[in-house]
Image (cartoon, coloured by chain):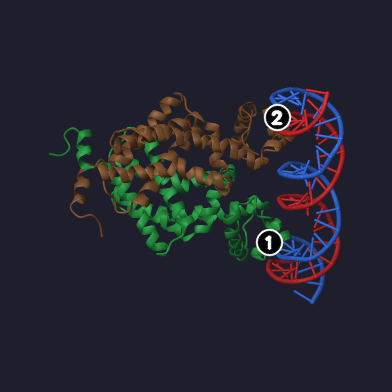
Chain colours: A brown, B green, C blue, D red
DNA sequence: TGAAATGTTGTACTGGCAGTACAACATAGG
DNA sequence: CCTATGTTGTACTGCCAGTACAACATTTCA
């Protein structure tokens, strides 16, 4: 069931929009066959049914994200700069694959129940961030926080939800402009915060009860 | 659908864990009937099938969240303080209803395709935040940002994903401790940001001596 | 009280669709 | 040319959501 021929793989992408639009449940195997031009029997020959189709498509997306983020993160810059690059990379891949992102969010439950995908999700989205935050504390470019795990999860949420919303909504300005806009907004938020300077000073004397 | 009798409503909650665990697809109507003690025919008499069950459960959760957050937001404090209260309120409801939260995230696609729920989702989660950010700029307790919509979406993501993860993971310390921990982490992040003070000065020309 | 309205439930059935079985056909490569 | 492996049409199976409906229960109110 592994190593799908390249031709079939590319045809399969034709199913992404369908799945994004109606969800996997609302999509019949015969619809997928028709939309992709791959006969039903052939789909079953290579893939493990509907879930297999989803797993293939999303696995690809996650690999792509993990790859781009991986590149963005492996520079010699300080962690803060790499964090900005990682945010931009993740958003850019997401915005360029709106159908896959919509399929992902729409069938998130299924995706997390497919063992490989659950792990791929984690390593594409969450882990790079967790690591960057730790690096940042080490190299002094990011603040030490009280609960790094919880903060990493929130940062992950901020980026991912923004990315999904960008992917879902589409835009007038084109994908790369979108990615840049969201990326700037997220970095502004997670790096500088929303408190006005006055309020910030109130806090710096004593950390918290 | 008409108004479900209170007794049935309370029994229906027995289905939440099932749905959270296996997803709505993996849950047969007969399983729901057995788990709740409500005969299948009765379920169909009152509700619109499986989706109806999900819609009822999630609708309830969203109302609860919207309600608590609504209370937290309607004080006379400044927007920043109210934002902290709203975060705490949302997390506390989420952590207290882990099964419903897991069902929500697992069947997010379905949920967003159920018209009432899509709107309820938006008004429970996103809108209060959007409003608070605007209020904060007005009353000076929060910074003006370049792209308020994108920032609101990210804040929404930070809170919601953290809440979901708290709900999914469960905890050793008990629900209210969890909510407090995450709430503190999120506020630290979205109010003060992660950049070290040195780096912050690089950005805001005349802010601090 | 009694009878109509409304709700409750068991049982039996239907239809749609995922997944399977398999045979016929194609193609590659050794 | 013969065997491996891949491709595809067709026909079938089994599961399960949803429906139909009749029998029974409870509430309402005249």
Numbered marks: total: 2
The image position of residue B141, as x and y in percent, is 26, 45
Question: Marks 1 and 2, Cα distance to the nearest angstrom?
Answer: 39 Å
User: Is residue B66 or residue D9 the one in the foreground?
Assistant: D9
Q: Quadrant of the C terminus of chain B?
A: top left
SS at mark 1 in the image: helix
Q: Which residue is mark 1?
A: B33
- On the image, the x and y values in percent for residue D22 come to 86, 62
Tell me, for residue A38, which label it has, or none. Answer: 2
Q: Nearer the viewer, mark 1 or mark 2?
A: 2
Image quarter of residue D12: top right
Residue at x 63%, y 33% (from the top left corner): A4
Q: Which mark is residue A10?
A: none
* Front-most of residues A202 and B115: A202
Q: Residue D27 versus residue A189: which sits nearer the camera?
A: A189
Circles 1 and 2: CB atoms closer than 8 Å: no
Residue in the image at 61% along x and 39% along y: A54
Q: In screen coordinates, is A189 left or right of A115?
A: left
Q: Residues within 10 Å of mark 1 (few under 14, many from 20)?
A: some
Q: Chain of mark 1?
A: B
Q: Is residue B5 left or right of residue C19?
A: left
On the same chain, marks 1 and 2? The answer is no
Vertical side of C1 occupied by B185: above or below? above
| Residue B193 in view of the camera | no
Q: Is residue B100 visible?
A: yes
Q: Label 2: few (<14), some or many (≥20) within 10 Å?
A: some
SS at circle 2: loop
| Most distant residue in the left direction | B209
């Amino acid at each position: 069931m592994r190593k799908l021929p390249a031709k079939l793989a590319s045809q399969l992408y034709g199913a992404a929009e369908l799945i994004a639009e109606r969800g996997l449940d609302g999509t019949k195997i015969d619809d997928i066959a028709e939309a992709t031009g791959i006969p039903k029997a052939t789909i079953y020959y290579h893939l493990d049914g509907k879930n297999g189709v989803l797993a293939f498509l999303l696995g690809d997306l996650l690999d792509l994200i993990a790859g781009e983020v991986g590149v963005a993160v492996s520079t010699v810059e300080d962690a803060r700069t790499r964090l900005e690059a990682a945010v931009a990379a993740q958003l850019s891949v997401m915005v360029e694959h709106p159908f896959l992102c919509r399929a992902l969010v729409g069938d998130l439950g299924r995706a997390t129940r497919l063992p490989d995908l659950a792990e791929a999700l984690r390593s594409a989205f969450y882990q790079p961030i967790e690591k960057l935050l730790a690096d940042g504390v080490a190299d002094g470019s990011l603040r030490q926080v009280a609960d790094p795990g919880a903060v990493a999860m929130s940062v992950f949420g901020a980026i991912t939800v923004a990315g999904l919303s960008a992917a879902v909504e589409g835009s007038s300005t084109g994908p790369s402009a979108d990615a840049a806009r969201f990326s700037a907004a997220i970095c502004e938020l997670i790096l500088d915060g929303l408190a006005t300077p006055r309020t910030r000073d109130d806090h710096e004397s004593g950390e918290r009860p």
